[in-house]
Amino acid sequence: MFMLYSLLFYRLEFHSSRKIQEERISQDEIRRSRIDHTVLGFPNIGNTCYMNATLQSLFSLQIFIEDIRRQESCWRANLPTHLLKCLADLHSARASCSRERKMSLLKNLKRTITANYSDFCGDQQQDAHEFLSVLLSQIKEEGVSLRTRVGLHPYTYTIESNFEFELLSTRTCLSCGDKVSKTESYNCLSVDLVPGGSVQDSLALYFKACEVECQCHWCYGQLSSVEQKLLSLPRVLVVQLKRFSLNSRGNLVKLHDRLHVSPQLCLQAHSRANVRRPGMPKPHLTQGDCYDSSFSPEGDVPLTAENKSSVEGRSAGRIGQDSCAMNDYRITSVLSHIGSNIQHGHYICESSQGNTTWLSFDDERVQQMDQQSALRQRSNSAYILFYEYR
């Protein structure tokens, strides 16, 4: 009975949150319609299209920006939060006509990044995914600094609450059937291209069980199968398409394979039955739920028959199957690489401004377009995709 009430409460809460989100989107559309979209671009300060495109993609994520703004009183006055200040100030100046102001803020942001990551010094072209990873990592570090050095315990980590999710990997010995599991946190899925397929197909390939050579510490068998499932879902799902591959000479070459950029993704098939959705609290773990972060013999946590029945019992207690609607994501932004190889080319971004209206950001050049055109045009150049939980 308690499970039934809990499920009904969550569904009511889910639909209420969804209604609030839809109202917020409508308000955002009204606000954005009053802004001249042609001024929203960023000047290129020296082969920084990778930075501009990444920032425009992040700024299209309203829930992420709201999280930063909501906690401005926590970080604005504290010295360790240089990057948060840069992002907030740059977002505020985005609708400004002052090119000089934007250039100054962009240079400041780049200096903040290069202070800890010297690879981004100079005017060389950089990889947008590497820049995104560094940016998210540094924002996360600033959040930790706020809590530990300044003692702001109410501060909510913006990266963990928006981008991070947990994957459960289960390794099964093909000789004796012994199972060992581990759980790890990620903020991005890097998936292979499926020529002629879709992003949904690439996800299916990523989560497909595979065989690996690994010695079992019970029977010393040499082969195991590995299966992955999502333990939690992020508010923002970042998908990197593996557009670059090593050739026979050891050089990175670009793959121009076309694929359908799915406007929506369903993760139900790749999630545990009791997957934790955005906004749900972390469950209290029992001993049978604890997974180590390593597959090493010292750190393995075998799924014993007792633990397995405990996990299966809780799953069986749920009312029905999770509907795909609860695991749905809608596309918010497409970051593309235009060019023949990773050392050369150009990065641009197309992002949603509402349900149907999209903007194309090519440094300072900004054009309006519809979603269908945006996704169709980037079938052979899409590199990083941003999806928001519905």
Image (tube, rainbow, N blue to C red):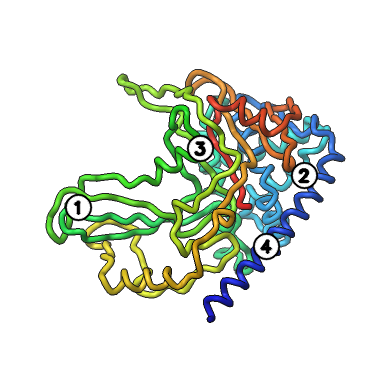
Residue bearing the label numbered 1: 174
Front residue of 74/319: it is: 319
Quarter-of-image position of residue 44? top right
* Mark found first going from the N terminus, 1 or 2: 2
Does residue 159 appear in the picture of this structure? no
- The answer for how far apart the CA atoms under marks 1 and 4 are is 43 Å
Number of disc labels: 4
Q: Secondary structure at mark 3?
A: helix
Is the residue under label 2 in contact with that under label 1 (CB below 8 Å)? no
Is the residue under label 3 in contact with that under label 1 (CB below 8 Å)? no
Residue bearing the label numbered 2: 92
Q: Amino acid at mark 3?
A: Val
Q: Looking at the picture, does residue 388 appear above or below residue 126?
A: below
Q: Amino acid at mark 1?
A: Leu
Q: Looking at the picture, does residue 366 appear above or below residue 387?
A: above
Front residue of 300/194: it is: 194
Q: Secondary structure at mark 4?
A: helix
Q: Looking at the picture, does residue 272 appear above or below residue 131?
A: below
Residue 144, position as x, y percentages in the image: 55, 59
- Which numbered circle lies on residue 322? none
Please give the name of the residue rendered at 39% of the width and 46% of the height, measured from the top-left corner. Answer: 207
Please give the name of the residue rendered at 48% of the width and 22% of the height, measured from the top-left corner. Answer: 256
Please give the name of the residue rendered at 50% of the width and 37% of the height, measured from the top-left corner. Answer: 199
* Mark found first going from the N terminus, 1 or 4: 4
Residue bearing the label numbered 3: 199
- The answer for how far apart the CA atoms under marks 2 and 3 are is 33 Å
Front residue of 222/262: it is: 262
Is the residue under label 4 in contact with that under label 2 (CB below 8 Å)? no
Residue 75, position as x, y percentages in the image: 67, 58
